[in-house]
Image (cartoon, coloured by chain):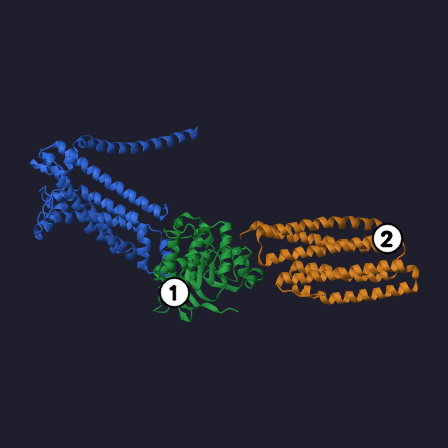
Chain colours: A green, B blue, C orange
Amino acid sequence: MTGTIIESRNLCLYYGRSQALKEINMSIPEKSVTAIIGPSGCGKSTFLRCLNRMNDLVPDVKITGNLIFRGGDVYSKGVDVVRLRKDIGMVFQKPNPFPMSIYDNVAYGPRIHGIKKKGDLNEIVERSLRQAALWDELKDRLNDSALGISGGQQQRLCIARCLAVGPEVILMDEPCSALDPIATAKIEDLMRELKSMYTIVIVTHNMQQAARASDRTAFFLMGELIEFDDTKKIFETPANKRTEDYITGRFG
Amino acid sequence: MAVNIRYLKDQLGILLLWTCGALTLGIMLMITLYILWNGLPIISLGFLSADPIQGGKSGGIFPTIVATLFITIIALILSAPLSIGGAIYMAEYAGENTLTRLVRFGADSLAGIPSIIIGLFGYLLFVSYTKLGFSLISGSLAVAFMAMPIILRVSEEAIKVVPESYKHGSLAIGATKWQTIRKVVLPTAIPGIITGLMLGMGRVVGETAVFLLTTGSVAQIPTSLSSAVRPMTVHMYIIATENISLPYAFGTAATLLIIVLIITLTSNYITRRYFVKLGGRR
Amino acid sequence: MSREYYLQQIKQLESDFSCMAEDSFELLTKSLKSLASEDIELAKKVMEESDSMADREIELENKCIELLATQQPMASDLRLISTVMKMLTDCRRFSRLAWDVSLITIRIDGEPLLPQITDICEMYRDVLSMVEDSFKAFHDRDVGLAMSMGKRDDVVDAQYDRIRRELIEVMICDPLSIDMASHLSFVARYLERAADHACSISSRTVYMVTGERVKIR
């Protein structure tokens, strides 16, 4: 039905001596929502950060294996990391809008990639805010500080900021864990709308969210990928006993 | 019964702390008020705009004000870029290693060196060896050494305090490290950096010993960088110790105090306006 | 192990359901006994107990819904609870069939039974063992036992067919016995229905254990 957009082959990650990711083999389908679940410390966020090479910022990290995106290995020499992060964007656990106006936040991405004309920027800002379902709420407050809006709006602003650079993939690291249930529901609705145009990979420790909002779910445990299948199958009839135990709350 | 004793101790503690605060404030106020009380009557437009007559016994202190301002500005121009640049490097690029620890230690030590020693160093290096003589530039260069460690340390802290999340957010959109620093980190750290600059300026404005050995003591308006000048602090020292005119010393002191006050208030105002622009939340 | 309370609730639900299941086919046995020995008192008692079964069914159904709402069960727990909810209906059917048989006992009111009653009792022995085994399969999560219900149901269906035909012959030969014959015919029908419910329970058991839907009849 849909092709694979990112494929991880035997991906291993070491923090110094300890191995955080063990031989991860996973094909992420495009234009869908893939959820990654698992107990704390199982490596799901670490794996997510490998996809856009944010782990490069952590000292003492070693990565082996391949991560194929658009036909090339993301970790091969000479890859333009800055360009990669334009194509694979990220939204973080705690909303982190810059201490600037709402407009400047969304325009930040396009500006650093060279778009200077006011008209172009206006268009991009409006389009991104519309896609993030924020335009109606904020269109009269574009020059207000981004720090003055609610947590849920801030997180959607971060999503808009991400969308403004035109990525193919959006990574979300527990995007709703700092938000109330209504804001969470709005973001889940947003994901459903966005997946027709973007590939979304979301790490969540909230199983119900993974069950509600994703098409495929991966279960990680202690650095290994235990099971990866359609969400419906994982939550109704998981194949692996460890997946079953985690999902039914027998541990974790 | 036990609750009462705890409550009593609690109240006692608060009282103690309050007393300390009040005492500190009180002493500060006392000094300030004493100087203003004795000095304000002396200050007049004439006092501020005229040249000193008879070595300062009468007349005004205009050239000294000019000297102090010029020295401050030049010292800042010399020290700020270096210090702020160094701070950016240490906070963002160098990471934690022996070199940065050494630099920090060096800066702290430099900040602690008695000013008379810096003055002597300035005399030997700038006045004598490089033949710059007793001049505006010698004084500015020497006192820049005193401002540098302060600006460096405070700016470094201000930059380090910028949340990692901002940097991650910027990098994750595809910004380079330098773009991130220029567009997100520095703007956020500006209030702290300005504080550093203000503290540095405060140090410079209040220096005496350094100038005694580097600027000379000619109370004239400088015509070039190599003119000898007499900053306000030196002027105060001279007319007070050589018993020329104590009231005028107070007048000079009061003027200096007011200048420092204006600087502090201005920087607070700028910082507050900036905070509001950032979003008022920190 | 986490979620102690939740796991306890699930265990409790299963054991309550097993109790109700046992009671329901015990009722069916009693109703047959009341018919065979024409014991009207027993029949009346069976009807009373059958009514109270309805309340038990609702109570257990509420328990299931409460678990779904408050504990968000997943995977095998979810399949267990949804299976129990459906099986409650089957259980209720057994007690309802017992009620129907007892009503017939009361209607017959002491009149002599036809000889076919022996066949019916034999048919019931097979049906009872089917019902008991279907619950056993559920309790033990025994897929093999569940799948074997299909064949046994065929046997029961054959028995039902034979009894029905015999009773029709009796009705044709002796018009005075039409009343009795039709009553007994209904009883046989109820027993055949019970066997069908046992099959339905078995196919739900297979779904619960494997996640696959199979038809057993």
Secondary structure of the residue carrying tag 1 is helix
Examine the rendered structure and indicate whether residue C217 appears above or below residue B70: below
The chain containing the residue under callout 2 comes to C
> Can residue A15 be seen by looking at this rendering?
no
| Of the pair C198 and B95, the residue shown nearer to us | B95
For the view shown, which residue lies furthest in the bottom direction?
A: A71
| Of the pair C45 and A93, the residue shown nearer to us | A93
Q: Judge if badges 2 and 1 mark residues of a common chain.
A: no
**Amino acid marked by disc 2:** Arg
In this rendering, position of residue C196 left or right of residue C41: left
| Residue A237 in which image quadrant | bottom right
**Number of numbered callouts drawn:** 2
| Of the pair C85 and B230, the residue shown nearer to us | B230
* Distance from the alpha carbon under mark 2 to that under mark 1: 84 Å
Q: Which mark is residue A84?
A: 1
Residue B87, percent across and down? 26, 53
Secondary structure of the residue carrying tag 2 is helix
Residue A154, percent across and down? 43, 51
Give the crowd class for mark 2: few <14, some 14-19, many >=20 residues within 10 Å: few
**Amino acid marked by disc 1:** Leu
Is the residue under label 1 in contact with that under label 2 (CB below 8 Å)? no
In this rendering, position of residue C47 left or right of residue A56: right
Residue A183, percent across and down? 49, 51
Which one is in front in this view, the residue at disc 2 or the one at disc 1? 1
Q: Residue at x 86, y 63 (%)?
A: C167
> Can residue A233 be seen by looking at this rendering?
yes
Residue A3, percent across and down? 49, 69
Q: Which mark is residue A146?
A: none
Examine the rendered structure and indicate whether residue B60 appears above or below residue A122: above
Q: Which residue is mark 2?
A: C107
